Image: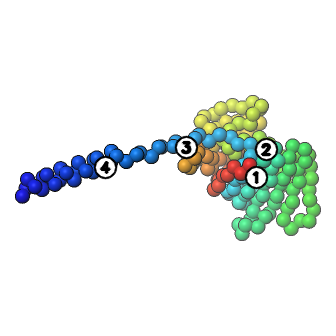
Amino acid sequence: MAQQLTRLSLLAVSSLILSACSTTPKPVIEAQPFQVKESFHTLGKLGIRSSKLTESANFIWQQQQDAFSIELLDPFGRRALQLKGDDQNVEMQVSGDDQLYKASSPEELMQALLGWQVPVRPAKYWIQGKPAPGLKYETLGPAHFVQSGWDINLRQTRDTADLRGIPRKIQLSNGELKLTLVFSEWSYPY
């Protein structure tokens, strides 16, 4: 009886091994490293801190080459501010204000209306954890650099099935102005 159980056990183990060998293994597709995109759609949460203010808002940033639209939303998901434009024109609409503000640069418009500004053109690279091309920068560590007077530090990344190293949290600071962006979603529809 003990001999029969041993033979049955050996047959069962042999069958499992043979059946495992006969299945075709699925190919492993490795996720590609994240590369800077010229066009994207991202959303998340923005924290703004300085000696004069501490604010937070949700944001939606759509970028298509040089054209952009950045919306700041209140805690209820209502648009509080929209900044949109391209290399030649920029306009800002503030919730509750019927006037459409216009300028030739987003920095000029933000400084005039908000009292602070972020260089939007290079920031489309910065929020992806990379220096803007064509501008000098100093590397302070992996995904940490200084460019145009701003300290950019990619604090967290995440991986998906397709991409490795997608920005999750980044900090931008210039003197006393500190911005923290936490991204909940990235997509590349264009």
Q: Residue beneath label 2, please?
A: 65
Kind of residue sitting beneath label 2: Gln
Q: Residue 105: x, y in percent?
A: 88, 45
Kind of residue sitting beneath label 3: Ala
- Secondary structure under the numbered disc 2 in the rendered image: loop
Disc 4 versus disc 3: distance between alpha carbons? 30 Å
Q: Residue beneath label 1, please?
A: 62
Q: Residue 127: x, y in percent?
A: 69, 45
Kind of residue sitting beneath label 1: Gln
Relative to residue 114, is residue 144 depicted above or below? above
For marks 2 and 3 on the same chain, the one whose residue lies earlier in the sequence: 3
Disc 1 versus disc 3: distance between alpha carbons? 24 Å
Disc 2 versus disc 4: distance between alpha carbons? 53 Å
The residue nearer to you, when weighing 29 against 126, is 29
Q: Residue beneath label 3, please?
A: 31
Q: Residue at x 25, y 50 (%)?
A: 15
Q: Residue beneath label 4, please?
A: 19
Residue sitting at the far left: 1
Q: Is residue 129 left or right of residue 91?
A: left
Q: Residue at x 71, y 36 (%)?
A: 131
Which tag is nearer the camera, tag 4 or tag 1? Answer: 4
